Amino acid sequence: MRLAILHYTHSPVIGGVERVIRDQAEALMQLGHQVDLLDHALWKKADTSHFDAIIVHNVFTMPFNLEWTRELTALAAAKPELRWINWVHDVAAVNPHYAHIQWQEAVPSALPVAVSEVRRQDYSQATGLPLESIHVIPNGLDFAAVLGLTPRIAELRLWEHDLVLAHPTRLIRRKNLELGIRTTAKLKQSGCDVVYAITGAPDPHQTDGKRYLEELKALAYELGVTEQLLWLGESAPLSDEDVRSLYVVADALFFPSTGEGFGLPLIESLAHRLPIFCSDLAVHREVLGKAGRYFGVDEKPDVISAQIMHWLQTDTVVHHRRHLWREHDMVKICQEHLEPLLLTATATL
């Protein structure tokens, strides 16, 4: 569809609504729509016949350009063949700071969308519209931008999975990736949508590096977890920025080595406040102390899987992150909530 998103100002102006409309426009373009982001000056130059739908953020409900508000209200009434959406972030009519401003009535030709239940009730109070006629679509985030992810990690959209285990490592046998693969298989069997992300490629200093990778892939195939494994360093080395991005978006570090001299990813993970599941080596306890969640190098994968699942189901922080990923990804919000409204027949508006 050809869409216009309207607001008083837009990026590079800094503000909450400005960020929302920027991310909304980007998400809609990712979904294949053509989007113009317009303030009043740009709107005056636009051809309304160019658009299939017009999303108006706050201009119908706030008094910062009443001339434009009146113009859009009249245009929405005159052009009902367009899909008009009145996106309500704020409602001047219920704000005592704007008591001196004459309230603009509801816009019958525009479908009202509020950013929260509170704003839905405010708009209903101000207009007399029934609550059920006002849709609620929460604000979302462009997670890749907010978290500063590199394009290489962002395109994986790892936040869409239940659990992401990061394993920064070279592919050498003492890193014990077999245990990671077997644990991943047990996690999958328990119903967990898990990803085991491995950063390294075969070690150029080890003559059997490629053979080890082939063995690991064969094991993954045998256990049915080929799709759950990400060999991130196989096609090209990851940059330091890529690895930092992985730490940011991962849920936990999985570090099952049978031997280490130190274990640098342990303190890197601590720096990123990442939970750590690691083998019970003396050096790991030396480095981490009580900060690690330990298991024996010969522990059964189902025991380790149960340990991880218990943490996943009970940890408050990971619960909040999962809720954030599920409810406030801007692309998902546009796809699941906004697109159906845009495709609604104008007769229902």
Image: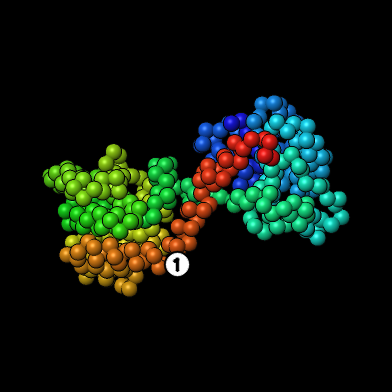
Q: Residues within 10 Å of mark 1 (few under 14, many from 20)?
A: few
Q: Residue furthest left?
A: 207
Nearer to the camera, 8 or 223: 223
Q: Residue furthest front?
A: 347
Residue shown at the point (51%, 45%) measured from the top left: 332
Rendered image quadrant of residue 338: top right
Work out whether residue 127 can be spotted. Answer: yes
Work out whether residue 19 can be spotted. Answer: no
Would residue 174 be found to the left or right of residue 314 on screen? left
Would residue 73 be found to the left or right of residue 239 on screen? right
Q: Position of residue 195 (x, y in %)?
A: 33, 51
Q: Residue furthest bottom?
A: 290
Mark 1 belongs to which amino acid? Thr
Q: Position of residue 290 (x, y in %)?
A: 33, 73
Q: Where is the N terminus found, in terms of image quarters?
A: top right
Rendered image quadrant of residue 250: bottom left
Residue shown at the point (78%, 32%) measured from the top left: 78
Nearer to the camera, 196 or 289: 196
Q: What residue did someone put label 1 on?
A: 316
Q: Position of residue 208 (x, y in %)?
A: 13, 45
Would residue 152 be found to the left or right of residue 33 on screen? left
Rendered image quadrant of residue 38: top right
Determine whether 180 is above or below 203 in the image.
Answer: below
Q: Position of residue 224 (x, y in %)?
A: 24, 48
Determine whether 147 is above or below 80 in the image.
Answer: below
Mark 1: secondary structure: helix
- For the image, the number of numbered tags is 1
Residue shown at the point (64%, 46%) measured from the top left: 18
Q: Where is the C terminus found, in terms of image quarters?
A: top right
